[in-house]
Amino acid sequence: MNFTVAIVGRPNVGKSTLFNRLVGKKLALVDDTPGVTRDRRPGDAKLVDLRFTIIDTAGLEQSGPETLQGRMWAQTEAAIDEADITLFVVDAKAGLTPADQTLADLLRRRGKPVVLVANKSEAKGSDGGFYDAFTLGLGDPCPISAEHGQGMIDLRDAIVEAIGEERAFPPTVDEAETNIDLRKTAEEGDDDEEPVYDETKPLRVAIIGRPNAGKSTLINRFLGEDRLLTGPEAGITRDSISVEWDWRGRTIKMFDTAGMRKKARVQEKLEKLSVADSLRSIRFAESVVIVFDATIPFEKQDLQLVDLVIREGRAAVLAFNKWDLVEDPQALLTDLREKTERLLPQARGIRAVPMSGQTGYGLDKLMQSIIDTDKVWNRRISTARLNKWLDAQQTQHPPPAVSGRRLKLKYMTQVKARPPGFMISCTRPDSVPESYIRYLTNGLRTDFQLPGVPIRIHLRASDNPFEGKKRR
């Protein structure tokens, strides 16, 4: 990506729709309600032959700096400062407003290249708003329809003219050198041995929890800057925003998600979209941190979120946030350990870390727990060790007899990792009781050090060599 573009404008002019059009995916939430976008969201954009980084921002609303709208606008100003060029989007259908004029004056004072975009130009009666845009003094407006994809060629030409040919189309890397490096990499990676855990591989981590648990504050503390919008109001975050940073030389990509309430309380369409976006982030991530409010831990919704992450097969870590507000930390820590073991039997051994996003207490320990859990999530066990273990387990606790015939577990192997999944070849797999599968699962977790990650055991009937042959 050779340059960065910020999309700005007042609320409900179609900034997020244009963002989704340029990135080619429905990443940003779109709704008729003004002010849906709150944080600034980056993405990789493609416009004909242009490749650049695009930033979606919140709309300009006149308000004090201490209010939510004021903090949203501070995020937008940060995006304008970060960008090389700004797309100023106005609504050609509704016409200009004083907020448009205010934003035009602000952009003019910044002195950066600006492309004036007249969105919704396909609508009937939009000509008046299009010609009014000339009065802003930011050059000729580019008429487009972000929803229908009209005018994208003209938008491309306007961006190239504003940023310059050299910046828009930098020289490409020599293909010959690239091919040599790729061949070398392929040869080095051609190895039949089991892969060793890569300490340098980028890690995707989703941060989830109930509203106002401190998820955005936690990520801001990791980054060391106010990258995400925070405040005392519950439910500030709506979009799932991804940010990247380095921890001890390893790239960490974190996803901040909207707070998830009980399903029965979610009534508004916008909140349903936010929750759906959070669920997609969980499926996309490798590790998931469930943030608990240490002052009111283990609400029913907290337990349901942990169960959701385990059922999705992700590597889960518990973070007890707001530890700086706890009066008796030692007593609470003992109580939390007991409740974790008792209330989360499906995630026995799950790592739980007391921390504070406000003060930074426990952040290094939390990140180390995430890395350690990811190692367990990626672990593979040899077939020889598994079959020796299976024989010992059957000797200690034989499978039960069903209808007078004892079940036989013959063979075991690990078929996948992320999370660890095992296949057992046995007689009458449908008759093996759930209690015996739990016995094997707990044994695997204890004997092979697999704490806190989901374990999948699949039973399969052994092949019968005489099946289908006629009896003489």
Image: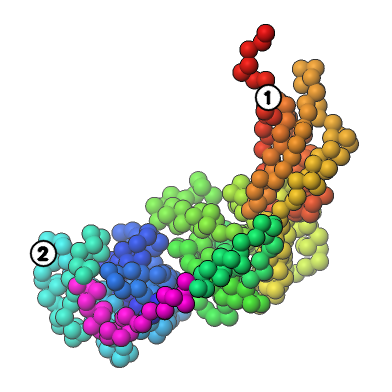
Vertical side of 278 occupied by 70: above or below: below
Type of amino acid at the residue the image marks with label 2: Gly
Looking at the image, which residue is at 88% across and 35% down?
395
Q: Quadrant of residue 14?
A: bottom left
Determine whether the residue tagged by mark 1 lies in a helix, strand or loop: loop
Q: Which mark is residue 125?
A: 2
Question: Which residue is at the front of the view, 257 or 267?
Answer: 257
The CA distance from mark 1 to mark 2 is: 75 Å
- Residue bounds of the magenta highlight: 154-179
Question: Which residue is at the front of the view, 7 or 185?
Answer: 185
Left or right: where 243 falls relative to 302: left
Looking at the image, which residue is at 69% across and 40% down?
423
Left or right: where 460 falls relative to 176: right
Determine whether the residue tagged by mark 2 lies in a helix, strand or loop: loop
Residue named by callout 1: 464
* Residue 182 in sight here: yes
Sequence-first disc among 1 and 2: 2
Q: Quadrant of the C terminus?
A: top right
Give the image location of residue 294, x and y in percent. 68, 63
Which residue is farthest top? 472
Type of amino acid at the residue the image marks with label 1: Asn
* Number of residues whose C-alpha sits closer than 10 Å to that of mark 2, classed few (under 14), some (14–19) or many (20 or more): few
Give the image location of residue 344, x and y in percent. 71, 49
* Residue 297 in sight here: no
Question: Which residue is at the front of the view, 412 or 243?
Answer: 412
Exactly how many numbered labels are in the figure? Answer: 2
Looking at the image, which residue is at 81% across and 60% down?
334
Give the image location of residue 103, x and y in percent. 28, 81
Residues at discs 1 and 2 in contact (Cβ within 8 Å): no
